Amino acid sequence: MGGGFSFMHTTPTLGAWRWLPVASAAAVWVVMLALTLAPDLRRAAAERFPWMLEPLYHDWHVVRIGWQAHAAGVDPLASPELPYNYPRFALLGGRLGGAAVPPNVAGPLLAALFLATAVWVVRPATRGEAVLAALGVASPPVWLLLERGNLDAVVFIVLAPGLWFLARRAPGPLALLGGSGALFVAAALKLFPAVILVAAMAFWRGARLRWSLLLVVVFAAWLVASLDEVALIMQKTTRGLEPAYGRMQAGSRYVAEVITPRVPAAEAASTLSLLMRVSLVAWLAGAAIALAVGWRLRDRLVPVASEAHDRVFFWSGALLYAGTFLLGSNWSYRLVFLLLCVPFLWHARRVPALRPVATVGLAGIGLQLLAPFHLPLGPFLVHQATAWATGWLLLAGAAGLLAAGNETATASKAR
């Protein structure tokens, strides 16, 4: 078994294969740098990959436009003429000098930091895991994230180390402050990471619980004072059928391609509205079942010999995926947060009783990360079914880990 790609070893073997994800990340970065420096190559790539936008690092250009407008005394979020659609908290980047950094410098730098963080997160322990990690680091959502230069990359870069600091055994005041600050920055930049702040109160104990409570109070106060921003962000945020994910995707595309060409517009709109309501009820019902199952099976997660931060990474990534799926429609670059779930599932596969469900979870994540963005309707609907099932499965695992927080921490210290 040691010479194959299996990751079912009781004693992990890796050797030189440990560098495979690093090589994959380096290759991605070199290609991004080439696209940055060679406009002709970029145009040729855009003809092959229709999801690419011009200019390169499109979303970073949007942020930079907001910084420049803010420096000129204009509120870019409130301005209907400007495409800026981020919380005003992100405008602090302009005050720190971000507007002076050209996108062709900021883009490759952001890509390098994200790829380094992703490689650090996945940390394979076997040859098979190294292969899968390399594929994940070079998956379509990663390409989309880096090509757009979206602030989700910044969220990933600050969130993963922040969770690691908080998960350390007996973290000191600086670790607690730094980790909590990182979580606040992530939530204030893109809002959806706030789900981690709430869940942390169920997982942590002692000083970390007190910091979590304080963090939730501070963020809630900030959010209440900024409610007008949420409405503006929702109004200005674009959505699409591909490349995107969420509970709305299957029904929206089915109506667009099957229903709309055959019936009057009013009837198609009514059908779409019905499917959106059904999708909301179905997702919430499945989520409730997943939470109940996770709670009942929480004791089975205790024997998993994983590091504390791998457990925290898992439930954070699972909640980010499940929560954004509930929102309805998200651009697929947000799927990169599924990488946080991978290390714990690798550890779980080494527990015989958990191997089948962990394998299914890894397969579901693999399908979400590696599937092409543009699929014919039939394969697209099948892929959407796996997306729903993956979300519920990961949510059940997150519920189990959150419910067994004390037990898993105790088991980790006992090893």
Image (cartoon, rainbow, N blue to C red):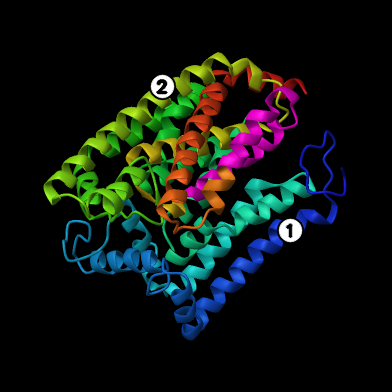
Sequence-wise, the earlier of marks 1 and 2 is 1
> Percent position (x, y) of residue 133?
67, 51
Q: Going 46% across and 66% down the picture, which residue do you hit?
A: 147
Residue at horizontal 58%, vertical 21%? Answer: 405
Q: Is residue 353 magenta?
A: yes
Looking at the rendered structure, the kind of residue marked 2 is Ala
The answer to whether residue 401 is left or right of residue 273 is right
- The magenta span reads 335-364
- In the rendering, at what x and y percent does residue 238 appear? 28, 56
Magenta stretch, main secondary structure class: helix
Q: Name the element at disc 2.
A: helix
Residue on which disc 1 sits: 20
The circle drawn on residue 288 is 2
Occupied quadrant, residue 340 = top right
Q: Which mark is residue 188?
A: none
Using the image as rendered, state which of residue 91 and residue 405 is in the foreground. 405
Where's the C terminus, which quadrant? top right
Q: Is-magenta flag for residue 77? A: no
Q: Residue furthest right?
A: 2
Q: Is residue 204 visible?
A: no
Percent of width and height locating residue 410: 67, 19
Q: Residues within 10 Å of mark 1 (few under 14, many from 20)?
A: many
Choose between 129 and 185: the one closer to the eye: 129
> Dot 1 lies on which element?
helix
Residue lying at 44% horizontally and 43% vertically, measured from the top left: 384
Q: Amino acid at mark 1?
A: Leu
